[in-house]
Amino acid sequence: MNSTMDKIREIEIGNLKPATFIRDQVAAISEAVGNGVAVNALSGGVDSSVVTLLGHRALGPRLKTYFIENGIMREGEAKRVAALFRRLGVKVEVIDARKQFFSALAGIDDPEQKREAITQTFYKTVFGPLVKKSGARFLLQGTNYTDVEETVAGVKRQHNILAQLGIDTVKTFGYTVLEPIIQLRKTGVRKVARLLDLPKEIWDRPPFPGPALAARVIGPVTPERIAIVRAATAIVEQELASSGAFQYLAILHQDKVTGVRGGRRQFGLQIEMRCWESTDAVTATPTPLPFAKLALLADRITDEVDGVVSVTYNVTKKPPSTIEAV
Ligand code: XMP
C-alpha cells in the first residue's frame, strides 16, 4: 500500500502556486474528457466545490453537477448549495436518494460497514444510473491527499477512496474517476478555492465528512436518529461559528442514561460535543472552550432537541481519538 502513496506526489503548501495549479488541472480535465461529458457530485464542502469549478472551467455545460440528497446532510444543505452555485453560473440538479441510503444503512452498527454501505449506494446505486443516463464516462471527485493517507494507513476507510484500494472503477461502476485535488491537503484546497472566487462561506467552512451525519451516529442510522444529531449539530455550529476552531460537531450515542425532567424519570439520549484545533486533521487537540459556553450548549441541546438528557464535551486528543466518531 505504501507504493500507492509514492505514486501520488503531494504538493506541500509552501510549493503550491494556485494559479498554475488551476491552469494545469483545467487542462488535465479537458484533455482526459475530450469532447465527452463528465459528472460530479457537489456537497457544498470546499473540496467538491473546488472540483466543480475546475470542471466547469474545463467543460462548461458538459459537466453535469448533482447534489445527492442522501438524507444524512445538515439542515437545509441541498437548497443552500444549489442556490449558491446557481449564483456562480453552475446549474446543480438535486437528486433525492434518501430512500436508497436509509435502506442501505438499515440494521448496520459497525462503522466500517456503514462507510461501505454509503460508498456502494453512492457510486453504484445512485451514480451508476446517473452516469448511464448522461452518457458520461467520467466522474470528477474531490479526493484530497489526507483522505488517501488515512485510508491507506488503515485508520478509516474514507468514503471516496477507490483506485487507491485497488478498485477498478470502470469494471465496478462503469466510469473513470478523475481526482483533480488529490495532491493537496485542506489548506491548499482552501487557497485554490479563494483564487477561484468561491465565497468565504465555502472556502472558510469547517470540514465535513463524506459519510455526513452517519459518521456522527453511534449505532443504527435511521431517519429519526439522524434528525436528532442534525438538530444538535445546528446548535453546535451556531454557537461555535465564531470560535475559530478547525471543526466542531455533535455525536449521538447509542447508550441511553437516566435523566429527570419535570420531576419524572426520563431514560434519555446522550449527545457528545467535540471541538478541534488542527491544521491538517491528521492530529488534533480539543479546544479549551470557556465553561460558560459549554453550559450554554448543554442547556440549548437539552431544551431544544427531543429526548436528550445528557451532553458531554470530549477532551481527548487525536490520536488516540479521531475527529469523527464512526
Ligand atoms: P477522522 O475522523 O478520521 O477525520 O479524524 C479526519 C478528517 O476527515 C473528515 N472525514 C472524512 N472526510 N470522507 C471525507 O471526505 C470520510 O469518509 C471522512 N471521515 C472523516 C473529518 O471530518 C475530519 O475533518
Image: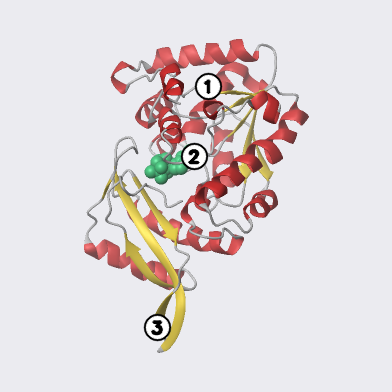
Of the four image quadrants, the one with ligand 1 is top left
Name which residue lies at 32% across and 43% down.
Answer: 246
Query: Foreground: 241 or 176?
Result: 176
Viewer-nearest of discs 2 and 3: 2
Q: Residue furthest right?
A: 133
Residue annotated with mark 2 = 157
Residue annotated with mark 3 = 260
Viewer-nearest of discs 2 and 1: 2
Whichever of callouts 2 and 1 sits on the residue coming sooner in the sequence is: 1
Secondary structure under the numbered disc 1 in the rendered image: helix
Point out which mark residue 2 bears.
none
Indicate the amino acid at tag 1. Leu
Mark 2–mark 3 CB contact (< 8 Å): no
Point out which mark residue 54 bears.
1
| Relative side of 61 to 259, left or right | right
**Local crowd at mark 1 within 10 Å, few (<14), some, or many (≥20)?**
many
In this picture, is 277 found above or below 265? above
Figure coloring:
secondary structure
Residue 9 image position (x, y, % from top left): 40, 17
In this picture, is 114 found above or below 52? below
Tell me: is circle 2 under 8 Å from ligand 1: yes
Residue 90 image position (x, y, % from top left): 60, 29
Indicate the amino acid at tag 3. Val
Q: Quadrant of residue 60?
A: top right
